[in-house]
Every structure is written in structure tokens, then in C-alpha cells.
Amino acid sequence: MDEIRLIDIRETILTVNGDEAEKVRERLGKDRVFMLNLMSSPGSGKTSIIVGTMKRLRDRYRIGVIEGDIDSMVDSEKIVSEGGYAVQLRTGGDCHLDASMVSSALDTMEVRDFDVIFVENIGNLVCPAEFDIGESLKAMILSVPEGDDKILKYPNMFRVCDVLLVNKVDAAGYFDFDFEALESRVRVLNPQMRVFRVSARTGEGLDEWCTYIEEKITAYREKTDTL
């Protein structure tokens, strides 16, 4: 044979995942369940942000959490210790969650018993950005200690997300972090992205963040009611 057959594995994987993500999205839509995909580097404060958000919203919404990690159940245990409901996805090496993994987690839950599901993706600014999991909203966290230049190094994550939470603002005095430079770059790369300055430790900015989520939940329900 003098012909070389090229098989684009990446394209095939993303296509299959996209099909599965649409099934997840349709499944959640039938029960009017709003799902948020939260992504970031390791240690940026994803779990703490979820806990702070959960505490502010749980008197009005039934909340579930899907935790993704390569190993351990530390984050799920933290959610449960704070009175939340959590399902742990342990990938054993995969650096992101995909739609089939999330679907497997949903299979263990009575989905209709929830109004909102938070998915804490695996700490990584590369792979999770490429995999649709059937979410209603993509959000990312950038913590102050990571620096304001991450948008230059990992543009795709900032490009695909609807929301950016700049966490650990209470520590800004200890780091050379230029908020204005970051937000200026965001406006160029992704003009529609909402930016919130927050602190999971002090609670700063979390009320505004939760108000935004409630607005998105309301809009989502109105949309699903017309389908």
C-alpha cells in the first residue's frame, strides 16, 4: 500500500463527547436542572467557592455536587461535612471530566430531586476547556497567587468560559497582581465574559456571584419551559 490513512483521534474523541454532552443537556433540561461546570488550576479554591455558594443558595435551591479528582475523596468529604450532597468521580489519571463521566455520576443521583448541580472539574487549565459535559454554564477560577498573565498562557480556557472568578483577592497585597491588566485582556479575548472579584475565605464578592447564578437559573428555566 502506498497510501497513508490519517485518523484524527482528537477530532473523533471530541465528536463522540459532544454527542454525549447533548444527551446530558437534554436529560437535565427535561427536569429543569441547571448544571455549572467549574474549572481552574489545582489549589485555586474551587471547593471553597462551591461551599460558599452552596451556603448562600441552599435555602432556595436543592443543590448537588459532582466532584472530579484523579484520586481521593477529600473534596467530596468537605462538601458533605458542610451539609451538602456529593458524588465523587475518581478518574485514576485522566486530567479532565468528559460527558460520559458526568452521565455516570448522574445515573447515581435522583436528578429530578435537584435544582442545581455544581461540577468541580479536575484542576487543569488545558484539557477541561475542550470537553463539553452538558453544562448550562462554564465558569473558571483564577486565584491571585497564580498571576494575572494566565490568560496569555491558557487563552482557550478564558475563551470558552462564561464567567471568571478572581479568587483570593484578600491576599492581593502580597502579590504583584494587576486586576486592570487582566480585565483588559479578558475584554479583548472574550468580551461577553463576566468577571467577579471574590474571596472564598472572607466571602467578599460571593453575594454578587450568587445573584448572577440566580439570574442564570431563572433564564434557564424560562428557556426550558418553552421547549
Image: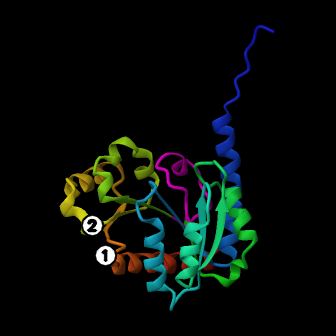
- The image quadrant that residue 7 belongs to is top right
Q: Position of residue 121 (x, y in %)?
A: 55, 59
Q: Nearer the viewer, residue 15 or 143?
A: 143
Q: Would you say residue 226 is visible in this rendering?
A: no
Q: Would you say residue 16 is visible in this rendering?
A: yes
Check residue 128 for magenta coloring: yes
Question: Which quadrant of the figure contains the C terminus?
Answer: bottom right
Label 1 sits on a secondary structure element that is: loop
**Disc 1 marks which residue?**
205
Instruction: In the rendered view, tell whether residue 119 sits above or below residue 147.
Output: below
Horizontal side, residue 185 vs residue 140: left or right: left
Instruction: Say which mark, if any, is on residue 169.
Output: 2
Q: Position of residue 210 (x, y in %)?
A: 41, 79
The crowd level at tag 2 (other Cα within 10 Å; few <14, some 14-19, many 20+) is many
Marks 2 and 1 close (CB-CB < 8 Å) = yes
Horizontal side, residue 196 vs residue 227: left or right: left
Check residue 9 for magenta coloring: no
- The residue drawn where x is 70% and y is 53% is 19
Report the magenta stretch's main SS. loop
Q: Position of residue 160 (x, y in %)?
A: 46, 53
The kind of residue tagged 2 is: Val
Q: Which residues are magenta?
A: 120-137
